Amino acid sequence: MIFMSEKLILDEIEKNKDKFVEFFRELLQIDSINPPGNEKNLANKIEKFLKEFKIKCDVFSYGNNRANLIAYLNDNFEGKNLLFNGHMDVVPPGSENEWKNPPLSAFVKRNKFIYGRGSTDMKGGLAAMILALTILKKLDIEISGNLILNAVADEETTGFGTEWSLENKLNTIKCDFAIVGEPTGLAPLPKALIVGERGHLLVKIVTNGISCHASMPSMGKNAIYMMGEIMQNLDKLDEYIPKTVPPIPLNKLKKLISEVFPSEEIFEKILEDQSLLQNLLLSLTQFTKVLTMIKGGIKENVVPDKCEATIDFRLLPEQIVETVISALKKLISEDLGYAIKEESGRAPGEIFVYLEIVHQSEGSYWKDWEKSAILRDFRNIVEKAYGKKPFFLLYPACADAHFLRNDGYCPQTILFGPGSANTAHATDEYIEIEDFINAIKVYTIFAYNFLK
Ligand SMILES: [Zn+2]
């Protein structure tokens, strides 16, 4: 047994930087674009890599070339358990010819940046977590607890991978702390440590009217006009939905961020001309809704009998999906007088509105984060690795953390990972190599300190 120190870990990372970058690039070059996903290709690659280090690893396939993976440092689950969670899927690259380099090429620029779909969201975080596991194994560090890696499929659409892993494999393992490796950079600010996230609800509204010749519009019922009525009145939802207090009020959020500035006054000055930051703060303290898609009409001279629209709702952590749906129903049926049907099928001449929940994921929040000594340790480790003090914040979008935090499995779950949120899902997505290397340091040193 080697006597371990943080220095040994840091030396190991320093010595192998190039190899680590190569491993990360190999993950980027494997296609796991979702849809369709094909995460099994990536899971097989990770399994092979981990087995070279004699790390126990299981790949759980679930058809259509999709899979989840669970690996662990040792066989002892009786002590403290630390969970690393990272998703293997990436969003589609969009129009590939708009990319300067092919999205799966993992192009390295000036030895400083790596470009490619998933570089930030989140194969960087995933690779860093895998590497942390191998470093601890290779150095044969004396550890009393266990480090568990859960690499999951389908985060970008349903969250099925994390949900499945929890329900079928992880529920019997006590989890003392969990890290989801999503990108938590908010350049030019230092790294954020995320202790909560908003919920997400996508609702498709279909208005069904009566079609007729456009020369005699009074014969029909224009479905696009029906949709127009709903959209014009959408702000009424704010009155109908019970008020929810944001988990962290605006002033407190400002205070949390201002801690990384020399003074609150300086932060306020900077905030004045940073619209991204202003909008971020606003979104973290509010329920928001926006029309994102609309489709209607089949021909220039036909009154349309069908119109479809999708509304993207973002909920505060404690807000409940049902309250939004019932507010929407109240608006459509009581205020506007349209019948609402539970199914889309229609009889001729029937006028009604059909509502469909396309996606929902709960928000979540670690209530006691301010009292956690572990979190303070984590913060110090990040500060040391990055040379800058990180700050605590909430996430405006959603991530798989809610599966872990909610229902009591592991409320003490944070998001922390390399990459900057503003390049996630974007064309020419990239990551800074230094950020990636620093994340390996944070994951490994934190795991060592937490489990020793
Ligand atoms: Zn992600």
Image (cartoon, grey):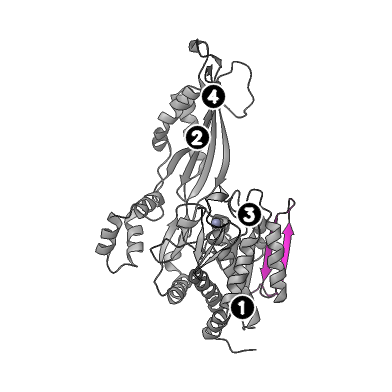
Q: CA distance from mark 1 to mark 2?
A: 51 Å
Residue at the image position 41 percent from the left and 68 percent from the top = 390
Q: Quarter-wise, where is residue 368 in the image?
A: bottom left
Q: Which residues are magenta?
A: 55-82
Compared across the picture, whether 399 is left or right of 282 comes to right
Q: Which mark is residue 326?
A: 2
Compared across the picture, whether 135 is left or right of 419 comes to right
Q: Earlier in the sequence, mark 1 or mark 4?
A: 1
Residue at the image position 42 percent from the left and 66 percent from the top = 370
Q: Viewer-proximal residue, 196 or 86? A: 86
> Type of residue at label 2?
Ser
Q: Which residue is mark 1?
A: 135
Classify the position of the C terminus by image quarter. Answer: bottom right
Q: Residues within 10 Å of mark 1 (few under 14, many from 20)?
A: some
> Type of residue at label 3?
Glu
Is disc 2 placed on a helix, strand or loop? helix
Q: Which mark is residue 163?
A: 3
Q: Which residue is mark 4?
A: 297
Q: Earlier in the sequence, mark 1 or mark 2?
A: 1
Task: Residue 3 in the image: state x and y as whole percent.
Answer: 59, 89
Is 57 one of the magenta-colored residues? yes
> Type of residue at label 1?
Ile
Q: Residues within 10 Å of mark 3 (few under 14, many from 20)?
A: some
Q: Nearer the viewer, mark 2 or mark 4?
A: 4
Q: CA distance from mark 2 to mark 3?
A: 26 Å
Task: Residue 216 in the image: state x and y as whole percent.
Answer: 50, 10
Task: Residue 147 in the image: state x and y as whole percent.
Answer: 62, 72
Q: Viewer-proximal residue, 332 or 425? A: 425
Q: Are marks 2 and 4 in contact (CB under 8 Å)?
A: no
Q: Earlier in the sequence, mark 4 or mark 3?
A: 3
Q: Earlier in the sequence, mark 2 or mark 4?
A: 4
Q: CA distance from mark 3 to mark 1?
A: 28 Å
